[in-house]
């Protein structure tokens, strides 16, 4: 059964339900064509032969820009959280990851000698004994692991920021197709090993 583009009262079009006979002022709907219209209208209302876009670039931007900008903000927040998890090599809820980061920061400052707390130091000594490691060596390990994780997180942060500015530029330049592609690329990110390749793909848009 065929379907048709039909006009609304304001002249904008919609796709009809199945119709056996072509109505007056209608054009057959062809789903195989590029029909990504924002505000479709007939090229000639009295004797239509084509469906065309009536929305201006400003019309499209007024709708798309706030939608994409909100999506960009949500994406950045999600990526930063995923970067935090990857940097400390932990899984869990956002509250758990934040708690672990705070804990590691305290252990790091104690290991550096910035915090003088006998009770905390005693607990770290106890942990070192549990792993059969000398306290001084255990402190060096804590410092190395923390600084390595921090460096990795900072790298991810700058990668996220670079991708954010790229996508925002695409939005500001009204490159809607490229913007959608960029978001779809981000969605393919499953592990940290993909980060560099994904950033490169986005920057090449």
Image (cartoon, rainbow, N blue to C red):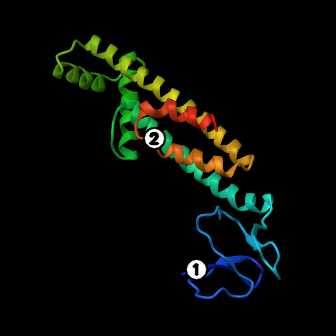
Q: Which image quadrant is residue 54 in?
A: bottom right
The residue at the point 70 percent across, 65 percent down is: 38
Q: Is residue 62 left or right of residue 130?
A: right
Sequence-first tag of 2 and 1:
1
- Check disc 1: other Cα within 10 Å, few if <14, some if 14-19, many if 20+: few
Judge by depth and name the residue closer to the eye, 155 or 193: 193
Q: CA distance from mark 2 to mark 1?
A: 41 Å
Q: Which mark is residue 2?
A: 1
Residue with the mark numbered 2: 189
Q: Which image quadrant is residue 3 in?
A: bottom right
Q: Is residue 27 something that shows in the picture?
A: yes
Secondary element type, mark 2: loop
Which of the image's four quarters has the N terminus?
bottom right
| Residue 103 on image: x %, y % | 36, 33
Q: Which mark is residue 172?
A: none
The residue at the point 75 percent across, 71 percent down is: 50
């Amino acid at each position: 059964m065929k379907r048709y583009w039909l006009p609304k009262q304001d002249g904008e079009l919609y796709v009809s339900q199945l119709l056996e006979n072509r109505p007056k002022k209608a054009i057959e709907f062809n789903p195989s064509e590029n029909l990504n219209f924002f505000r479709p209208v007939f090229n000639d209302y009295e004797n239509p032969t084509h469906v065309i876009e009536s929305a201006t670039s400003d019309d499209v931007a007024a709708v798309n820009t706030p939608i994409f900008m909100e999506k960009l903000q949500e994406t950045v927040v999600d990526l930063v959280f995923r970067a935090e998890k990857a940097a400390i090599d932990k899984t869990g809820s956002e509250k758990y990851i934040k708690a672990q980061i705070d804990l590691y920061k305290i252990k790091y400052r104690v290991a550096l000698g910035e915090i003088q707390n006998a009770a905390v130091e005693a607990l770290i000594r106890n942990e070192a004994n549990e792993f059969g490691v000398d306290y001084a060596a255990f402190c060096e390990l804590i410092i190395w692991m923390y600084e390595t994780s921090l460096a990795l997180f900072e790298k991810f942060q700058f990668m996220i920021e670079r991708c954010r500015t790229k996508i925002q530029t695409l939005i500001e330049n009204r490159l809607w197709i490229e913007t959608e592609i960029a978001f779809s690329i981000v969605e393919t990110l499953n592990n940290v090993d993909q980060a560099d390749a994904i950033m490169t793909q986005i920057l090449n848009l």
